[in-house]
Image (spheres, helix red, strand yellow):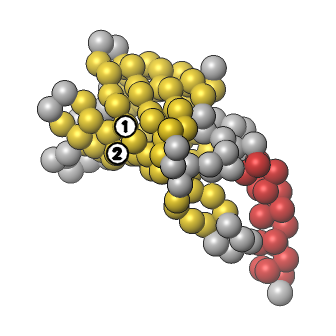
């Protein structure tokens, strides 16, 4: 019973954030390269394009273009991936860059920035990336 009460209280606290969560916007990006751990910086822009998101990264002289789906709480106990919407608190993206591809997953954090993990085709490593709204 106590666990149920605590879970319900936590979800009530998170619910207002989900309503403000909309990932659409422009972000400053800080991440780490999966191969050598070196830091990189750049920008990312997220647009809602019908049922999907368009995500464009500009990192140094490289551009990456992705298509994503959103995720949100649909009940007190159920989290669901689906079409893009303003109450999404998570974003899953497939992207292309030159002659390669990759996948990334981001979650909105309590302070409003987004954190994720990503990898590219053929890699055996994953690494992190953080987005801060401009």
Labelled pair 1, 2 in contact (Cβ < 8 Å): yes
Q: Secondary structure at mark 1?
A: strand
Q: Where on the picture, by quarter, is residue 55?
A: top left
The reply to whether residue 132 is visible in this rendering is: no
Residue that mark 2 sits on: 94
Q: Position of residue 128 (x, y in %)?
A: 42, 40
Viewer-side residue, 17 vs 68: 68
Direction from residue 125 to residue 10 in the image, left or right: right
Viewer-side residue, 120 vs 6: 120
Q: Residue at x 15, y 47 (%)?
A: 122
Viewer-side residue, 98 vs 121: 98
Dot 1 crowding, Cα within 10 Å, few <14, some 14–19, many 20+: many
Q: Where on the picture, by quarter, is residue 3?
A: bottom right
Dot 2 crowding, Cα within 10 Å, few <14, some 14–19, many 20+: some
Q: Position of residue 121 (x, y in %)?
A: 20, 45
For the N terminus, the quadrant is bottom right
The reply to whether residue 14 is visible in this rendering is: yes
Residue that mark 1 sits on: 66
């Amino acid at each position: 019973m106590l666990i149920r009460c605590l879970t319900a209280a936590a979800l009530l606290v998170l619910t207002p954030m989900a309503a403000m969560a909309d990932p659409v916007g422009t972000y400053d990006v800080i991440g780490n390269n999966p191969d050598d751990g070196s830091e990189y910086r750049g920008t990312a822009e997220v647009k809602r394009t019908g049922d999907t998101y368009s995500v464009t990264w500009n990192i140094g002289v490289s551009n990456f273009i992705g298509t994503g789906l959103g995720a949100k709480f649909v009940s007190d106990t159920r989290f669901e991936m689906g079409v893009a919407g303003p109450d999404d608190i998570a974003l899953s993206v497939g992207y292309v860059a030159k002659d390669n591809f990759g996948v990334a997953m981001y979650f909105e954090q309590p302070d409003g920035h987004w954190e994720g993990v990503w990898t590219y085709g053929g890699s055996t490593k994953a690494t992190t990336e953080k987005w801060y709204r401009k």
